[in-house]
C-alpha cells in the first residue's frame, strides 16, 4: 500500500526547498528520506561570508554598486605558495533556492561525510547564494521593480568575481542542480580553463523552451497580473500573494511525477487540501524576487558555444523528469560530441525533484571525481586526493 503521508511530505519538502531559503538549516530529516544515513557534523566545518563587489555591470548595461554575494563554505581551504586556494569545489543551487539547499539531509548525508564524494576533509566546498537569493543582493532589499534585470550569464560572471576575491582561481569541480546545472554549462563555456571537471544535473544544453518555458511564463504572468503588483512598486506591508497559488501548483506539476501527486491527493478533498498546503509554502516568497528569478533564464542558451568547453563533463538527467523530458536526444548528442563528455540517464523515481536526492547520483559524482584524479592534465589533483 502506498504511504500517502510520506508522499505528501515529500512534495511539500521539495516545494519548501525551492520556496523558503531558510528550510535547509533544519536539523530533522524530511519525510522524503526516512532511511537516509546519519549525516556529517557540518557545523564544525561550516562558515558563511560575504563578498562585496564595488560595482557590477550587468550584460544589459545596468549597474549595481555594490553587489553583495553571500556564500556558505564547507571544509578547509588548502593554499599554494602564492596563497591561492587549490581544493575548491563550486556547487550551484536550483531556482529560488540558496546555497544552503545542499545542507538538507537528502543531499548532505550522501555528499560531504568521510569517504563520500565531497568529503569536507579533502575539499573546500563553496555554496553561493546567486544574485537575487538568500543573503545576496536581491530586489526585495528595496529596489523592487527598479532592480537590474539579470540573467544566468550575469550570475556566472558574479560567481567568478566572488571566487577571485576569495583567492580561488581554479576549481576542482563545478556542479549544479537544475538552474545551477544550466549555470554549470555556462561556466564551462565562459571560463573553460577555470576547472578540472563540470557536472550539470537535470538540465538541457539548449534555450529554455517547450514545457520548461511555458510553466515559467505562467508563473511570471501570475506575478505581473497580481492585483497588488503595481508594476513592481508594491506595498511591502501588503505585498502581492495571489500569484502564489499558480506558482505553487505549476511547480508541483513540473517537478514531481503523476504517481506521487496522485498519492499526495488520492481524492478530491485531499487534493484540494494539498493545493492549499502547497500554496501556503509560497506565501513567504517575495513576488519581485520570484519574478526576477524565473525571468532570468531568458538569456540561457549554451548551444552556440559548446565548442569552447575544455573540461571533462558528466551530464546527469532523470528518466522521469518532466522539466527536461528524456526523449529529447539533444542533451546526449551534445555531451557525447564533446572531446571528453559523458551523458548518463538515471532511472529517477522523484521526477525533477531527484536533484534533491543525492542517493540517486552521488556514486556517479564520486566516480567522476576519481576519473579526474587519474587524468594526465595540467591541473594536478590536490594533495591527498586519490
Image (cartoon, rainbow, N blue to C red):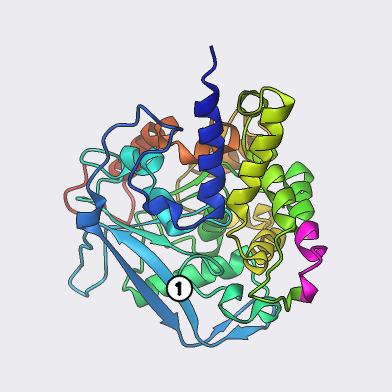
Left or right of 22: which side holds 267? right
Q: Residues within 10 Å of mark 1 (few under 14, many from 20)?
A: many
Q: Is residue 117 or residue 19 the one in the foreground?
A: 19
Q: Is residue 340 or residue 208 the one in the foreground?
A: 208
Identify the element where label 1 is drawn. strand
Quarter residue 64 falls in: bottom right
Left or right of 171: which side holds 342? right
Q: Is residue 169 above or below residue 92?
A: below
Q: Is residue 338 above or below residue 294?
A: above
Q: Is residue 163 or residue 111 the one in the foreground?
A: 111
Percent of width and height locating residue 330: 68, 39
Residue drawn at point x = 71 percent, y = 29 percent: 269
Q: Is residue 335 visible?
A: yes
Quarter residue 297 falls in: bottom right
In the picture, which quadrant includes the C terminus?
top left
Is 227 magenta? The answer is yes
Left or right of 266: which side holds 174? left
Please give the residue where the numbered disc 1 appears in the rendered image: 69
Left or right of 32: which side holds 116? left
What segment is highlighted magenta in the picture? 221-231
Q: Is residue 148 visible?
A: no
Residue drawn at point x = 26 percent, y = 71 percent: 84
Percent of width and height locating residue 208: 72, 51
Percent of width and height locating residue 326: 66, 31
Residue drawn at point x = 26 percent, y = 66 percent: 85
Is 55 magenta? The answer is no
Q: Is residue 304 or residue 263 the one in the foreground?
A: 263
Amino acid at each position: 500500500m502506498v504511504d500517502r503521508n510520506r508522499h505528501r511530505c515529500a512534495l511539500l519538502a521539495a516545494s519548501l526547498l525551492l520556496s523558503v531559503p531558510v528550510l535547509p538549516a533544519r536539523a530533522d530529516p524530511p519525510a522524503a528520506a526516512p532511511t537516509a544515513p546519519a549525516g556529517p557534523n557540518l557545523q564544525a566545518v561550516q562558515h558563511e561570508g560575504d563578498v562585496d563587489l564595488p560595482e557590477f555591470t550587468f550584460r544589459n548595461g545596468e549597474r549595481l554598486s555594490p553587489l553583495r554575494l553571500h556564500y556558505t563554505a564547507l571544509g578547509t581551504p588548502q593554499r599554494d605558495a602564492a596563497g591561492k586556494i587549490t581544493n575548491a569545489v563550486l556547487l550551484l543551487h536550483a531556482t529560488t533556492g540558496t546555497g544552503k539547499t545542499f545542507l538538507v539531509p537528502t543531499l548532505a548525508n550522501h555528499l560531504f561525510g568521510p569517504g563520500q564524494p565531497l568529503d569536507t576533509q579533502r575539499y573546500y566546498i563553496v555554496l553561493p547564494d546567486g544574485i537575487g537569493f538568500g543573503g545576496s543582493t536581491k530586489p526585495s532589499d528595496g529596489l523592487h521593480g527598479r532592480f537590474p534585470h539579470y540573467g544566468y550569464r550575469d550570475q556566472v560572471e558574479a560567481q567568478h568575481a566572488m571566487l577571485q576575491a576569495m583567492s580561488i582561481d581554479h576549481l576542482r569541480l563545478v556542479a549544479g542542480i537544475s538552474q545551477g546545472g544550466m549555470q554549470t554549462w555556462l561556466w564551462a563555456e565562459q571560463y573553460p580553463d577555470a576547472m578540472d571537471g563540470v557536472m550539470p544535473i537535470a538540465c538541457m544544453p539548449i534555450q529554455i523552451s517547450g514545457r520548461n518555458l511555458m510553466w515559467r511564463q505562467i508563473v511570471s504572468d501570475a506575478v505581473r497580473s497580481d492585483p497588488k503588483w503595481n508594476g513592481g512598486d508594491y506595498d511591502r506591508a501588503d505585498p502581492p500573494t495571489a500569484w502564489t497559488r499558480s506558482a505553487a501548483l505549476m511547480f508541483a506539476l513540473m517537478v514531481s511525477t503523476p504517481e506521487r501527486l496522485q498519492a499526495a491527493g488520492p481524492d478530491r478533498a485531499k487534493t484540494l487540501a494539498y493545493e492549499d498546503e502547497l500554496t501556503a509554502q509560497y506565501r513567504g516568497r517575495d513576488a519581485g524576487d520570484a519574478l526576477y528569478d524565473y525571468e532570468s533564464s531568458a538569456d540561457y542558451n549554451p548551444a552556440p558555444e559548446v565548442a569552447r568547453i575544455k573540461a571533462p563533463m558528466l551530464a546527469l538527467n532523470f528518466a522521469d523528469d518532466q522539466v527536461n523530458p528524456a526523449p529529447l536526444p539533444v542533451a546526449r548528442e551534445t555531451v557525447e560530441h564533446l572531446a571528453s563528455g559523458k551523458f548518463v540517464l538515471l532511472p529517477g523515481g522523484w521526477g525533477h525533484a531527484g536533484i534533491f536526492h543525492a542517493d540517486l547520483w552521488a556514486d556517479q559524482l564520486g566516480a567522476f571525481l576519481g576519473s579526474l584524479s587519474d587524468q594526465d592534465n595540467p591541473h594536478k589533483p590536490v594533495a591527498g586526493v586519490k
